[in-house]
Amino acid sequence: MDASCVVRILGSAAGGGYPQWNCRCPVCALAWDGDARVVRRTQSSIAVRGRSGSWALVNASPDIRQQLLDNPPLQPRRASRDSPVAAVVLTNADIDHVAGLLGLRERWPLRLFATQPVLAALSANPIFRALDEMLVERREIAPDVPFHPVPDVEMELFPVPGKAPLWDEGEEVKTDIEDGRTVGVALRGAGQGDWAHYVPGCAAVTDAFRRRVDGTRLLLFDGTLYDDDEMIRLGLGPKTGRRMGHIPVGGPDGSLAAFAGCAIARKAYVHINNSNPLLISGSPERREVETAGWLVAEDGMEFAL
Ligand code: MLT
Ligand code: MN
Ligand code: ZN
């Protein structure tokens, strides 16, 4: 039988993609040099469809055009104006998750779903008026209330700790805000059993979050940095992962340890920064997460639910 719900990874990298245009860190250098241990990745997004074949994008990455070119099921096939993409759901207002909305401005009816703080961030940026409000309806979603972005797919948005978008940080930056500015997405075929979870940005794994995902069928989780100080150590920037609103993968306080006691049928890291050694097939860090049952997501990977 056809799966009730299919999740396709459109972009598995964090902001900047892999390799990043202006980076020759040790991991990016492998991609620039064509090393067989790495593959290129576009920026953070998934697509979800139910049985009807309409797709909901979760996040609209700056690489959206490349992603639609790379994924034939998301291409027009019926009429002179057509797309199976019917909805966009946002997990925050970061540039890697919303800039792709501007790539969808060619007068196609879409429904846009996000929490109040994320919709407010879009409204504060007049450039998003390029999406004609007569065609692109913005729907505010309350935390933990189910909705159907396309008729046969059910989702819930649940707040996770995070911070304001980088472009809107202000002077004092708190990374533990849980007001819906950063959310995870629970998803399943409408009414079809157990939930899957997509969480591309998360500053800390709370007990409530752990309870939510324990025993479920799929977790796609924030794998931005392996080590909290990885970017500082490599001379790439002054910030830790935590300061950027991302819990690291490794270490005693990392996500690998945080989920170690959970029974989750399938687990994959997404939103992976170009500096992260998880990107290198066979690296010690990659072997460590694989031994713990995690996949490292690649663009084009599909999960049937
Ligand atoms: C993040 O995930 O921290 C952001 O995407 C950073 C950015 O806006 O470049
Ligand atoms: Mn990001
Ligand atoms: Zn790099």
Image: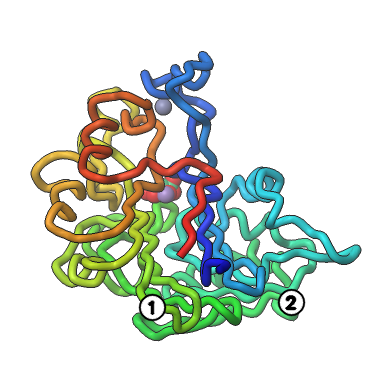
Question: Mark 2 highlights which residue?
Answer: 135
- For label 1, the SS is loop
- In primary-sequence order, the first of circles 2 and 1 is 2
Q: Kindly identify the amino acid type of the residue bearing the numbered disc 1.
A: Gly
Q: Quadrant of residue 285?
A: top left
| Vertical side of 115 occupied by 96: above or below | above
Going 38% across and 31% down the picture, which residue do you hit?
A: 279
Question: Mark 1 highlights which residue?
Answer: 193
Q: Kindly identify the amino acid type of the residue bearing the numbered disc 2.
A: Leu
| Vertical side of 249 occupied by 236: above or below | above
User: What's the coloring here?
Assistant: rainbow
Say whether residue 236 is left or right of residue 66: left
The image shows residue 95 at horizontal and vertical percentages of: 50, 52
Going 18% across and 70% down the picture, which residue do you hit?
A: 211
Q: Residues within 10 Å of mark 1 (few under 14, many from 20)?
A: few
Marks counted in the figure total 2
The image shows residue 225 at horizontal and vertical percentages of: 29, 39
The image shows residue 44 at horizontal and vertical percentages of: 48, 49
